[in-house]
C-alpha cells in the first residue's frame, strides 16, 4: 500500500534521511524503532507531506509524489490519504472533544454537519469516550486527550494511520489505554505506521519492525527477528539500552 524509494531529507547541513526505502503492506502494522534523532518522525512526516523530501518518491495507493518538486495538488492528495496522531494531542483547547473531532470533516472536507456529528460521536464511543463528548481538553486526562486525537484522525476517513510516539508523553497507565485502542484498530485491519519505543507493543502487535539509525534503515523484518535476534550490532546496542 505504501512504497517509499530513495527518500532523502536535510535540514540545512543536517542529513536526516539518507536514502530510505520502505514498503508497508495493506492491513499491516509497521513499527519504526530507533534512537532519538535517527529520522523516524521526519520519515513519518514525509509520508503525510508535512515535510517535503529533497529526493525520492512516496506512493500511497494510487497517490504518488515525486521529489524534488511535487505539485501542491499532489501533496494535498498525499496528505488526505493518512490520519496522523501526534506525540501530544494538539487539541483545540476551547473546543469540546466532539468539536475537536468534527472540525476537520466539517471545515476541511465540507461534509454535512449532522452526518459528521453522528460519526464523530460513534468514534468517540469506540475509543471509550462516549461519556466525554462535551468535555473540554483540560477536563480530560492525557490518555483521554490522546484518544480524542485518534478519533479525530479516524474522522477524516483516512486510508492509513500514522502515529508519532503516541504514548511517550503519558504515564504507563494512561499510555496503556491508548495502546489498547491502537491494538483494537490493528485487529480491525487498519494499516498503521507507528513510531514508538514501546517494544512490548511492537512484539505483540507489529507485523513488521523497521530499525533506523542515523537516517538509514539498518534492518527490518518480523518483530521476533528484529527484536529477538537482531543481525546488526547497532540494533542490539539500541535494544539493550531501552529494554
Ligand atoms: P527521531 O524521530 O528519530 O527522534 P527526527 O526525525 O525527529 O528523529 O529528527 C532527526 C533530526 O532532524 C534531529 O537531529 C532533529 O533535531 C532534526 N530536525 C527535525 N526536524 C527539524 C526541523 N524542522 N528543522 C531542523 N532540524 C530538524
Image (cartoon, rainbow, N blue to C red):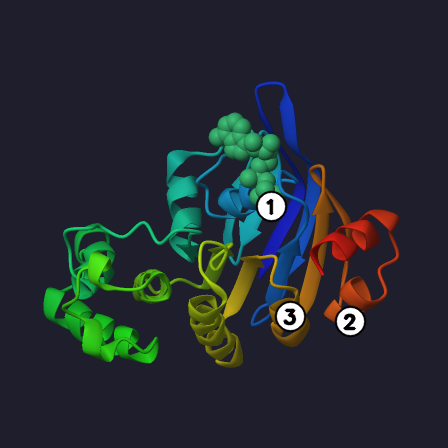
Residue 32 is left or right of residue 173, and the answer is right
Q: Residue furthest left?
A: 114
User: Dot 3: within a 10 Å radius of its alpha carbon, few (fewer than 14), some, or many (20 or more) residues?
Assistant: few
What's the mark number on residue 224?
2
Quadrant containing ligand 1: top right
- Element marked by disc 2: helix
Vertical placement of 135 versus 23: above or below?
A: below
Q: CA distance from mark 2 to mark 3?
A: 11 Å
Q: In the rendering, at what x and y percent does residue 227 appear? A: 77, 64
Q: CA distance from mark 2 to mark 1?
A: 21 Å
Q: In the rendering, at what x and y percent does residue 1 appear? A: 58, 62
Q: In the rendering, at what x and y percent does residue 83 appear? A: 40, 57
- The residue indicated by pointer 1 is 40
- Element marked by disc 1: helix
Q: In the rendering, at what x and y percent does residue 173 appear? A: 46, 71
Q: Residue at x 18, y 71 (%)?
A: 133
- The residue indicated by pointer 3 is 200
Q: Residue furthest top?
A: 13
Which mark is first along the chain, 1 or 3?
1
Amino acid at each position: 500500500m505504501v512504497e517509499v524509494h530513495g527518500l532523502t531529507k536535510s535540514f540545512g547541513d543536517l542529513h536526516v534521511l539518507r536514502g530510505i526505502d520502505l514498503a508497508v503492506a495493506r492491513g499491516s502494522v509497521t513499527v519504526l524503532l530507533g534512537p532519538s534523532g535517527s529520522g523516524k518522525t521526519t520519515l513519518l512526516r514525509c509520508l503525510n507531506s508535512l515535510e517535503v523530501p529533497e529526493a525520492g518518491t512516496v506512493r500511497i495507493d494510487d497517490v504518488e509524489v515525486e521529489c524534488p518538486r511535487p505539485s501542491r495538488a499532489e501533496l494535498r492528495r498525499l496528505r488526505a490519504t493518512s490520519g496522523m496522531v501526534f506525540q501530544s494531542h494538539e487539541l483545540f483547547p476551547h473546543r469540546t472533544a466532539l468539536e475537536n473531532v468534527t472540525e476537520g470533516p466539517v471545515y476541511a472536507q465540507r461534509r454535512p454537519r449532522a452526518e459528521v456529528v453522528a460519526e464523530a460521536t460513534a468514534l468517540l464511543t469506540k475509543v471509550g469516550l462516549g461519556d466525554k463528548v462535551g468535555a473540554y481538553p483540560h477536563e480530560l486526562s492525557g490518555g483521554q486527550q490522546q484518544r480524542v486525537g485518534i478519533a479525530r484522525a479516524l474522522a477524516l476517513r483516512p486510508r492509513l494511520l500514522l502515529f508519532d510516539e503516541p504514548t511517550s508523553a503519558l504515564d504507563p497507565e494512561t499510555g496503556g489505554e491508548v495502546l489498547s485502542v491502537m491494538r483494537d484498530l490493528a485487529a480491525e485491519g487498519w494499516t498503521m505506521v507507528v513510531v514508538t519505543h514501546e517494544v512490548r507493543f511492537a512484539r505483540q502487535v507489529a507485523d513488521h519492525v523497521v530499525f533506523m539509525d542515523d537516517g538509514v534503515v539498518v534492518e527490518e523484518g518480523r518483530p521476533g527477528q528484529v527484536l529477538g535476534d537482531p543481525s546488526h550490532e547497532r540494533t542490539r546496542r539500541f535494544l539493550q539500552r531501552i529494554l
